[in-house]
Image: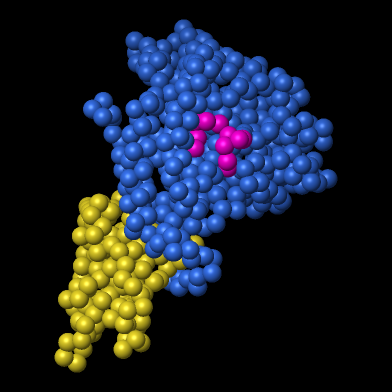
Chain colours: A yellow, B blue
Amino acid sequence: MAYSKKVVDKFENTIKEPEKFNVGRFDPKELNVGTGMVGAPACGDVMKLQIKCEPKGNTHVIKDVKFKTYGCGSAIASSSELVEMLIGKTLEEAKEIKNKDIATALELPSIKIHCSVLAEDSIKKAIEDYEAKQ
Amino acid sequence: MTNLNLPIYLDYASTTPADKRVAQKIYEHLTLEGNFGNPASRSHAYGWTAEESVEEARAHVANLVNCDPREIVFTSGATESDNLAIKGVANFYKSKGKHIITSKIEHKAVLDPCRQLEREGFTVTYLDPNEFGIITPKQIEEAIQEDTVLISIMHINNELGTVNDIQAIGSLARSKGIFFHVDAAQSTGKVAIDLRELEIDLMSFSAHKTYGPKGVGALFVSRKPRVRLEAQIHGGGHERGMRSGTLATHQIVGMGEAFRLAKLEMESDNKRIAMLHQRLLDGIQHIDEIYINGGLDHKVPNILNVSFAYIEGESLMMALKDIAVSSGSACTSASLEPSYVLRALGRKDELAHSSIRFSIGRFTTEEEVDYTVSILDQAVSRLRELSPLWEMYLDGVDLDSVEWQAT
């Protein structure tokens, strides 16, 4: 598998310094936390994304993010990339993030586009969960 | 760690480096100053000496597995040997029967020719291994039909290192008058093979799994009882008509030298490898939730296939970039299927996805094993910290009860 240097660096940095790269978890029961988990062990990847938000004007802003990912190198790199994109965004802005943005940023090989799709789905699910609680 | 040559090569079951003594032999059979002739040239000394070298190599190959040199046919590798054995026998004896028995954990070089024969009107039974990765003689007995013409079962499985009882299967096949082919690509230099004792009709060998060059292998074709084959490659009638094409002298002498050394050094190699295997095993034993695929009781020590639960194999390999191993997860290729061999063992998907095959060889050192253990320890704990499945496991969640949202 010929990964771009970006995928390899992202992956390596994430596993070396998990805290710096937002690996971890929030209590999913907290009202200001939205959790999205997508994928399946049988498919070889599961992503769990959690956003912590606070209201700002008539919207909500993502203040902090935590994630955990089981999957191949590009799945882990994709989630880590997504997390960086999310912090400070409003929910509306976050919904605009497309898998293509992640795939382009990491130069994912075409057979790994699936990983970026999964990342996009995880943010959608996390926002859904958060909005349902409000 | 100063002497370590990174990445550490622990993928000997995939291929081995050629032994330096083998490389020297190969070099001696290439240039004008060397023995470069065509072994089929009858009219001059260049041909005669090349033929002598080939026959010497054939004797070394035969000697390792205790058969008559006339029973050895040189091919381009174990894949060609498997093709020649399976398609050759099936096509030659198709009036006798059109049913073949093999297993789900064979190498693709056996499975794909079987699939091809199915397209040509044969029927094939693919047996499941037991939990130890073994195909039992009883399973084969139950699968035998009136029209069974060939049984093809591997000796040592390339992913698991598990060893099938080819002696018992051979006796069974012989008693029923069914031809028996064994893919022994992983066996030479690892376990003793005595083809005068074993009731085997055809056996495939590879040079490059035993410190020889790539691109050459051999097929044992029994003379007593005689087995006939339909040639798959025509053009000159070399190798008694079974495999045409100018003999690749340099590769064949390389294989001969590699097999000669295997005979001489098998015992000492195996002793060292068994010690290194134990060292690796002792080193990883304390890691939670690991599974030895195929178990430890029915396997050769040079291969160790381990699943690290809740971690995906490809990411583990990326985290182990200083160690050259292979993953049972085919996520490394275009398909997202986990290893078909581990699937056939009945491993759950998440375990099949998380397997690593370590294979140790002649040049592996204690220092390399120790380094591997330390890197592995770190990689597994880092990836588990990142794994939502590991988190769920620690929280006591039953992963089978979760409704996954696969995309």
Q: In this view, does B2 lie above or below A103?
A: above
Left or right side of A69 for B204: right
Q: Which range of residues does the magenta coloring cover? A: B294-304
Q: Residue furthest top?
A: B45
Q: In which quarter of the image is the C terminus of chain A?
A: bottom left
Q: Specify whether residue A62 is painted magenta.
A: no
- Image coordinates for residue A32, horizontal then vertical, percent: 28, 81
* Nearer to us in this view, B299 or B337: B299
Q: Residue at x 55, y 49 (%)?
A: B342
Q: Which residue is more in the foreground, B360 or B84?
A: B360
As rendered, which of A131 and B405 lies closer to the eye? A131
In the rendered structure, the answer to whether residue B356 lies left or right of residue B227 reads: left
Q: Position of residue B236 (x, y in %)?
A: 56, 26
Dominant SS in magenta: loop
Tell me if residue B372 can be seen: yes
**Residue at the spot x=31%, y=82% of the render?**
A31
Q: Residue B135 lies in what quarter of the image?
A: top right
Q: Residue at x 66, y 20 (%)?
A: B194
The image shows residue B224 at horizontal and vertical percentages of: 75, 22
Q: Is residue A9 above or below residue A104?
A: above
Residue drawn at 46 percent across, 40 percent down: B285
The picture quadrant where one finds residue B364 is top left
How many numbered markers are drawn? 0
* Quadrant position of residue B153: top right
Of residue B93 and residue A102, the one placed in the foreground of this image is A102
Look at the image and say whether residue B298 sits in the magenta stretch.
yes
- Residue B212 visible in the shown view: no
Q: Where is residue A119 in the image (x, y as percent from the top left)?
A: 32, 69
